[in-house]
Image (cartoon, helix red, strand yellow):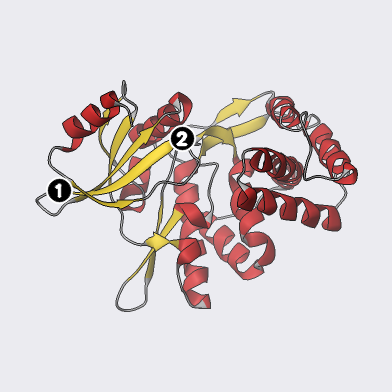
């Protein structure tokens, strides 16, 4: 961390002990769990990406208050140094938690409910050119070396991306856009009741609602119909036919882009996840149907 960041941290936190490093390797963020002499726990996040910092600060100021104790709340910020100080939440990552089937279903029902509350945290907007912009973004990530994709996989992905341009204008809502079990915390009490919280809002922005269903569908709900049912019960509805089209075409394009870009940056686990999702889509559906 730079001297200015270290100075900002000292100003924001005062005397505090670093309890744990919560950072993801290879990302732009440094995340620390702190404990003040009073025993209060806080999370400090310094982000070298101006865009990621700005998005998360906006979400903490305007949207996470609607989620209450089920999301981090802003304690303080240094905008020049791009440092955030947030409340710490109990629990462990949902993807690492050991839960019964009933607890898992309750966890995903709560997740759906929290996503609905986030989507309602600001007035709806309209994106007139969502499909065109998203298609351009995805194509740009497939123009370099295409390893590890085969020619057939690349062609399949590009055909799906072409379909994005046929989408009509989209209703945009406050969106998380990285809603996966990695960004959910599960806290289980002595009676076995699970409480879910949502973290990591650095990708959040106004976006088409279907895209906010996408990550959790690709990573978990696609193979667990019981959790999908619980999630959409919590949300209050299932995706519309239009949203399902968006999810299908964006899902294929996103999977290909992740497989390529993650491999290029050496994040092989993420690359394999994207490649697996792409192959699964190829086995299940044609992009023009």
Question: Which label's residue is closer to the chain start, 2 or 1?
Answer: 2
Label 2 Cα crowd, 10 Å radius (few <14 / some 14-19 / many 20+): some
- Residue carrying label 2: 28
Q: Which circle, 2 or 1, is nearer the viewer?
A: 2
**Residue at the (69%, 25%) spot, across then down:** 133
Give the camera-side residue of 31 and 234: 31
**8 left or right, relative to 96:** left
As drawn, the residue found furthest toward the top would be: 80
Can residue 289 be seen here? The reply is no
Locate the N terminus and report the quarter of the image it occupies.
top left
Q: Position of residue 25 (x, y in %)?
A: 47, 45
- Residue carrying label 1: 36
Distance between the alpha carbons at the discs numbered 2 and 1: 25 Å
Q: Position of residue 164 (x, y in %)?
A: 77, 34
Q: How many marks?
A: 2
Give the camera-side residue of 147 and 198: 147
Give the camera-side residue of 11 and 117: 11
Can residue 73 be seen here? The reply is yes
Question: Residue 238 occupies which quadrant of the picture?
Answer: bottom right
Q: Position of residue 185 (x, y in %)?
A: 41, 58
Question: Residue 154 occupies which quadrant of the picture?
Answer: top right
């Amino acid at each position: 961390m730079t001297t200015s960041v270290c100075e900002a941290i000292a100003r924001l936190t005062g005397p505090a002990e670093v309890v744990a490093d919560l950072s993801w390797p290879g990302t732009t963020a440094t995340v620390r769990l702190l404990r003040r002499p009073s025993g209060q726990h806080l999370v400090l996040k310094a982000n070298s990406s101006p865009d990621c910092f700005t998005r998360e600060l906006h979400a903490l100021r305007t949207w996470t208050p609607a989620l209450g104790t089920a999301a981090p709340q802003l304690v303080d910020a240094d905008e020049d140094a791009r440092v955030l100080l947030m409340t710490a939440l109990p629990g462990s990552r949902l993807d690492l938690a050991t839960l019964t089937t009933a607890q898992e279903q309750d966890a995903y029902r709560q997740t759906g409910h929290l996503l609905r509350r986030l989507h309602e945290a600001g007035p709806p907007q309209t994106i007139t050119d969502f499909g065109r912009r998203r298609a351009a973004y995805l194509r740009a990530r497939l123009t370099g070396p295409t390893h590890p994709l085969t020619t057939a996989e690349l062609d399949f992905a590009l055909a799906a991306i072409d379909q994005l341009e046929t989408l009509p204008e989209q209703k945009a809502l406050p969106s998380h856009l990285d809603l996966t079990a990695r960004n959910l915390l599960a806290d289980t009490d002595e009676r076995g009741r699970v409480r879910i919280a949502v973290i990591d809002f650095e990708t959040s922005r106004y976006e088409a609602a279907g895209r906010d269903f996408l990550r959790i569908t690709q990573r978990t709900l696609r193979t667990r119909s019981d959790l999908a049912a619980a999630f959409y019960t919590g949300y209050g509805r299932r995706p519309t036919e239009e949203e399902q089209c968006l999810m299908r075409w964006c899902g294929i394009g996103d999977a290909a882009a992740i497989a390529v870009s993650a491999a290029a940056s050496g994040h092989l686990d993420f690359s394999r996840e994207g490649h697996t999702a792409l192959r699964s889509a190829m086995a299940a559906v044609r992009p023009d149907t």
